[in-house]
Amino acid sequence: MAALSAATAIVSIVVPFAAGLSLLGTVPMGLLAYRYRIRAVAAAMIAGSVIAFLIAGMGGLLTVVECAYVGVLTGLVKRRRRGTPTLIVVGLCGSLASGAATVGALMMLSRLRNLIFESMIANINGLARGLSHVPYMQPVSAHLKDGFPRVLTYWPLLIGGGSAVGVLIMILIGWWALSHVINRLSNVAGLQKLDTPPDTGMIAPLPVRLHDVTFRYPRSDHDALGPVTLNVEPGEHVAITGVNGSGKTTLMLVLAGQPPTSGTIERPGGVGLGKVGGTAVIMQHPESQVLGTRVADDVVWGLPPGQSTDVHRLLEEVGLDGLAERDTGGLSGGELQRLAVAAALAREPSLLIADEVTSMVDQPGRAALLRLLAGLRERHRMALVHITHYNNEADSAERIVNLTGDGSRDNTEMVEPAAVPTAKPPPDARSAAPVIEVDGVGHEYASGTPWATTALRDVSFDVHEGDGLLIHGGNGSGKSTLAWVMAGLTVPTTGSCLLDGRPVSNQVGAVAMSFQAARLQLMRGRVDREVASAAGFSQHDKSRVVAALTTVGLDPSLATRRIDQLSGGQMRRVVLAGLLARSPRALILDEPLAGVDATSQRGLLRLLDDLRRRAGLTMVVISHDFAGLHELCPRTLHLQDGAVLPAPARAGGAS
Amino acid sequence: MSAPARRPVVLLRPVPGTSPIHELWAGTKLIVVFGISVLLTFYPGWVPIGLIAALVLTAAWTARIPRGALPSVPRWLWMLVALGGITAALGGGSPYVHIGSVGFGLGGLLYFLRVTALSLVLLGLGAMTSWTTNVAEVAPAVATLGRPLRILRIPIDEWAASLGLALRAFPMLIDEFRVLYAARRLRPREVALTRRARLKRWRAEVIDMVTAAITVALRRADEMGDAIAARGGTGQISAAPSRPRWPDAIALAVVVAVSAAAIVSEWLLLG
């Protein structure tokens, strides 16, 4: 299963790479061959070929096949732990074989070959004729004109050899890049969690009795869960609460069939994860658990062949009626989660586990989702285990289990932030010219094509020195586009966005931006290198790295930590450290609290508030939620359908 | 202040609306495009190219594809084509035309035009499919088309499932790559004075970029793996399996007739 999904994801990088730099498309394929079986590479190659064929025809298909070929060769040599000499031997044989294949193909396609050759000769002759009018170039011209057709008579050697050399170069570069990438990825363990042994016999997950159950992840030195003693009876609604690191998600894994490290679990039959009458799980990330491209397809995805499902009734139950034919890509987080509930219900589960399902959903979506979950047991005979860190979400349960695990080890303690090492005017300098002027900005994506969509219309506002502005809007309100415009990353189709009176798109980097997905912004492997590279100073300049880390309240001992070992909140702080070290004119934060647990959220808010008040940093926060942002951002701008709403329409507060 | 907008390449999204072409079974379109591509690589003559071009244009007209669907062609590509055209035209060769007393050899230019036309037709053929097909229909169609391969113990269902998932993950990953690229633009560029330092920086950047892209993809893969496990493994991939119907038979018949005409003409003209 891991192989299949890895193959899938790899395809999605190979295709764009293959389009531009086919040299690099070999690396992901090589990684696939290195980590998984050839079967996964085959699936990736077929899927990639079809997509490339849809995009770029035969040429695209052949490029993907070539990437897969080179990837398999380099990946397998790596996997067998052989060195460069083996690779050179394999590479020589492999490139000769591919050269021979090219020659064979051209032998068969005689007409295409003639066409290509004649056209090449025509171009060369033309070039020769042009050169013959240039003084001193006549001899070159004559050589070209006579020599080229003669050379072409040896085309099998020429083209076969040329293509072999090309493939050999691809193999060598692919090998070099693959070696580096594998080194960098070696400490990134697979994060796939739901990997349960297959069931044998009858499926009956309930009633389940856990007795002194503990769980410890491989290569870890402490228990992530327990010891826990817990029963779940059929038809029961249990809420599981606890702080981050108390093992809530680990408990979900154990309930979903992961064998515990110690203790006993009694069930009458198999867990039946995803099976009819078994256990269903709904997870935190709305986007990544939806597998179908169309809503209706997603409901049935993975059901055994032949089983018929009343898709429309299920969609109606979760409040998505009429959306069956819609693309899942256009749904909001809340709608995606309700779709996941529909997919779970299609399996008529005896046990439904909802793991932090609301944490990435906006306020209205959260309310609808909770109502749906609470009402499920009236219509279905199943037990609901709801894992949440919001206490008010647990209220509708019949029983609340509070996990008190020792979570401190996962949260590196934050030190109190020091002052930002930049001299800034005091925040009350309102009378001066605005820092950012957004004037009549409108933006349309793909304008001029049938797919044109308007993201922003006629948006105007100013941001002054030391301001704290919240740009609030729902899904598709254009708030992210506005953020990109203000950072100078997108040039708006109409209007202008000025920073200190000059177009911000000419000064990319002057306005710092922290993206929603912090991981995407961290490019180096280690914290100190990352901060140094983002801030533009040498990575050996330890004192500046330490200063930057202290500014955002991170312990300097984290400097040598690998990026992939950081928690979500820490990653966000490392991003901020790099950005702030460049003393930006303003800081834009896109959903700064998303995917960060409640404790870290409070810490992050305190830090940001401090930066704005004490250092006078100008801040623009983009969010779909108001939760706790009033302090940080006294001013709020509401966006809807790409336009600014005139009256401050106050939606419900935060949980 | 804004320059006339360049039309971007829009990938894997059908032109809004519906038409007889939109409603054809995705499998039919795949067969047609694949078949014609093979035909044109074997017989890249003027008559086949012309016939297929006519077919593509008719299909585009039937599917009501607006001209705006075509992406803008960057200037360097125009220049490249012009350069190729000029050198080929200078190359001369038969046939000759005479204007007054000056003779022109058109042979080179004709060869060049044929290669260009061939590439355009092949691109147009692929574009027609992606302009009229919802990506959700592609994976089930591949599963149906590949059913005979099951006898050879080829895991066609696994391939179709990963194709479907890849198409689902594709836009999400493209978005993530956009963010990656934007984040890069926001960073200061390291100054490298010597050529050696520049090369070193370039190499480091390539490795950083590839690693970041792979990390993102693998993370996505892990989450997707969890989601697949939560569904109990692979199985059905489509709620309403579409099948070829009689319009598909007509479309196939038309394509076969045109292709046959193209092949016959090639044999008659060139022997």
Image: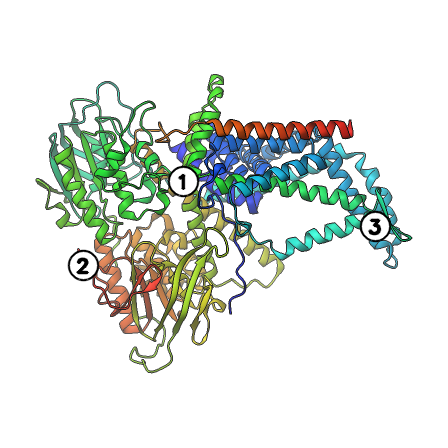
- Residue, disc 1: B168
* In this picture, residue B231 sits left or right of residue A40: left
Residue A475 x/y as whole percent:
31, 54
Residue A352 x/y as whole percent:
20, 34
Which is nearer the N-term, disc 3 or disc 2? 3
* Residue A483 location, quadrant: bottom left
Disc 1 is placed on an element classified as helix
- Residue, disc 2: A652
Residue A418 x/y as whole percent:
29, 68
Q: Are marks 2 and 1 in contact (CB under 8 Å)?
A: no
Q: Residue furthest left?
A: A398
- Give the letter of the chain under mark 2: A
Residue visible at 51% across and 45% down?
B64
Tell me the crowding category of disc 1: few under 14, some 14 to 19, or many 20 or more residues within 10 angstroms, Cα based: many
* Residue A303 location, quadrant: top left
- Residue, disc 3: A128
Q: Callout 1, which amino acid?
A: Arg
User: Does residue A408 show up?
Assistant: no
Residue visible at 24% across and 35% down?
A314
* In this picture, residue A131 sits left or right of residue A200: right
